[in-house]
Image (spheres, rainbow, N blue to C red):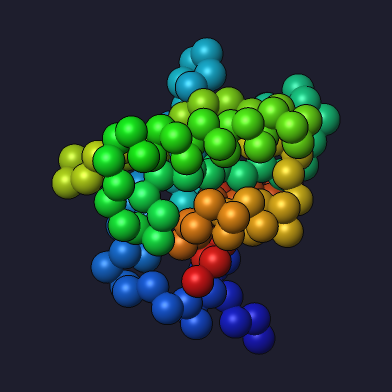
Amino acid sequence: MSNKDKQGCNPNTVLPNELINAYKKTNFDVFTEPLFTLNIGVFSERLASMYNENSVETACFITAYNPFSKALTLEENEISQNRLMENLVKSGNQFFEGIGLDPTGEWDGESSFLVLGISKQEASDLGNEFKQNAVVWCGKNCVPQLLFLR
C-alpha cells in the first residue's frame, strides 16, 4: 500500500494539519484567457487542454512567497518571486502567472506561476530552493495534488 493518500499528500509531513487543510482549500488561479482555477484533487479540463496545446504531460504551481510559511514583507516576497521568475526563464519551460488564494480571505494571496512540462523532481528541487513547504504537482491525469517538501 502506498504511503500517500488519494491526493498525493505525504502523511509523514511535519506540517500541521491546519496548514495542510488550508493548502487543500486554496484556489490556484492561473492568469490565462480565460482565467481558470486549479483545486487539489479535482480534474482540470483547462489544464488538459493546455497539456495538449503545448505537448506536455506535467505542470507545477509554485510560489516563492513566504518561505516555510513565514510572512515576509511585500517587497521581500517580490524579490524572491522575481528570482523564481528568472529561474523559470532560464529553464526554458513555458509558464503563466497566477495567484494562490484563500477562499475565506483569511490570508493574502500569493503570486505564483504555473510551469508546464516540469518534472516532479525539478518541481521538488525548485520548491526546496525557494524554501516552500509544498508545491502543487499535476501529472498526466490533470488532477492537482500537493507535493510536500517538509
Q: Residue at x 69, y 28 (%)?
A: 89
Asked whether the viewer can see residue 39, the reply is: yes
Most foreground residue, 125 or 45: 125
Q: Is residue 148 left or right of residue 116?
A: left
In the rendered image, the vertical position of residue 144 relative to residue 49, given as above or below: below
Q: Quick check: 147 above or below 117?
A: below
Q: Which of the 4 quarters of the picture holds residue 69?
A: bottom left
**Looking at the rendering, which quadrant does residue 124 occupy?**
bottom right
Locate the N terminus by quadrant.
bottom right
* Nearer-the-camera pick, 70 or 97: 70
Looking at the image, residue 137 lies above or below residue 90:
below
Q: Position of residue 93 (x, y in %)?
A: 74, 32
Task: Give the residue drawn at x 58%, y 59%.
Answer: 128
Of residue 137 and residue 14, the one placed in the foreground of this image is: 14
Image x and y of residue 146, in percent: 52, 59
> Which residue is at the far top?
33
Residue shown at 40% from the left, 44% from the top:
65
142 and 73: which is toward the camera: 73
Could you tell whether 120 is left or right of 137 in the image? Answer: right
Furthest-bottom residue in this view: 1
Q: How many numbered circles does the render carry?
A: 0
Q: Is residue 33 left or right of residue 68?
A: right
Can the viewer see residue 37 in this picture?
Answer: no
